[in-house]
Amino acid sequence: MPSYSMGQLVKEVRMRKKWSIAKLQEQSQAFADEESGAILQTLVRMERNWQNPYPNTAAVVMEALDMPVNQFFCPYLEQYDAKVSYKIYPNSKAVPLIKQNQTNQAMKPSFVEVLATRKSTRSFSSSNVDLSTLSQFLTLGCGHRDDAPASISRTYPSAGGRFPIEIYIAILRSDDIERGVYHYNVKDGALELIKSGDFSQTLHKFYERQKLETDYPCLIFFSLVFNRTMGKYGERGYRYALLDAGHMGQNLYLVATYLGLGIVGFGQSGVSDKVIEDFLGIASSKESLVYSFALGHPQK
């Protein structure tokens, strides 16, 4: 059987939903070209480890051929463990978060106090959120659990362990973090800079309908990657993914209260979600904005 060109191969890979594992195996063995066979062998392995199609063609090709992301005009890719997928921006500047010991936190205030005093904050002080505080906030609120096997479980529940929510953070003012928009790489515990600059006016305009008394130093976005949950549960997976966002939102509220931070959730912006998705650089056909939060220090 003649080997495929790269373009033909990618087209074939995009049709993989119709292929059984046996068909993938047969195709990969039939290819005379080593590279084509390697790509399909990768698909076979992924299909066996996770009974859903591998959703990112560029990631498959790059893993098999060890090629850089920009050769496929793809700024990010999905990376897989046996069960869980992670979004990463391998060409971005990474800011490592300060490692936290989740099980050795001095619990002040008490958990009951945290529950009783949790609230939305609409008046923020001029204090900035530094890297140490943001590291605690993200690690406790939505990071991997210290006691989790193979780094799969996180600090919030997710239907089927699919973890479909990605997190983006806009740093509007900080003493030790460059201003810009970052992606939270939960697997590596790092912030990946995807857009550098001062976007305060742009982002405040997005949410100008929100009745806030002051501006805020940090804005957090949740996006939903549809295929992670819907690939397993079908249409009902969309409902499950929204529940995931709710679990995460409550976690962020409780952790913010515990750390003495202020937080408020935004359910609606003053512009179309598509405008914000374009700003974040995400493809709305595969990943969509579902929730956002302002974060800072509350006004005393």
Image (spheres, helix red, strand yellow):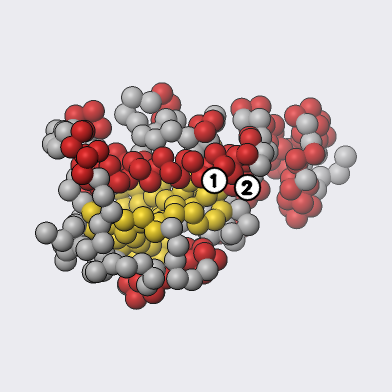
Q: Give residue 196's mark.
A: none
Q: Give residue 56's mark.
A: 2
Mark 2 or 1, nearer chain start: 2
Q: Quadrant of residue 82?
A: top right
Judging by the rendered image, the residue that carries numbered circle 1 is 78
Residue 221 spot, x, y in % from top left: 41, 56
Disc 2/disc 1 C-alpha distance (Å)? 7 Å
Q: Residue at x 42, y 30 (%)?
A: 153
Do residues under tags 2 and 1 come within 8 Å of each other at their CB atoms? yes
Compare residues 208 and 51 and report the one nearer the observer: 208
**Residue 177 appears in the figure:** no
Total label count? 2
Horizontal relation, residue 209 to residue 98: left or right: right
Residue 200 spot, x, y in % from top left: 32, 72
Q: Amino acid at mark 1?
A: Glu
Vertical order, 175 against 248 (above or below): below
Vertical order, 296 against 38 (above or below): below
Vertical order, 161 against 283 (above or below): above
Horizontal relation, residue 16 to residue 170: left or right: right
Residue 133 spot, x, y in % from top left: 21, 49
Q: Residue at x 54, y 45 (%)?
A: 78
**Residue 1 appears in the figure:** yes
- Badge 1 marks a residue whose secondary structure is strand
Horizontal relation, residue 32 to residue 217: left or right: right
Residue 100 spot, x, y in % from top left: 24, 37
Q: Residue at x 34, y 76 (%)?
A: 201
Horizontal relation, residue 164 to residue 111: left or right: right
Q: Residue at x 59, y 44 (%)?
A: 238
| Placement of the C terminus among the 4 image quadrants | bottom left
Q: Amino acid at mark 2?
A: Asn
Q: Quadrant of residue 39?
A: top right
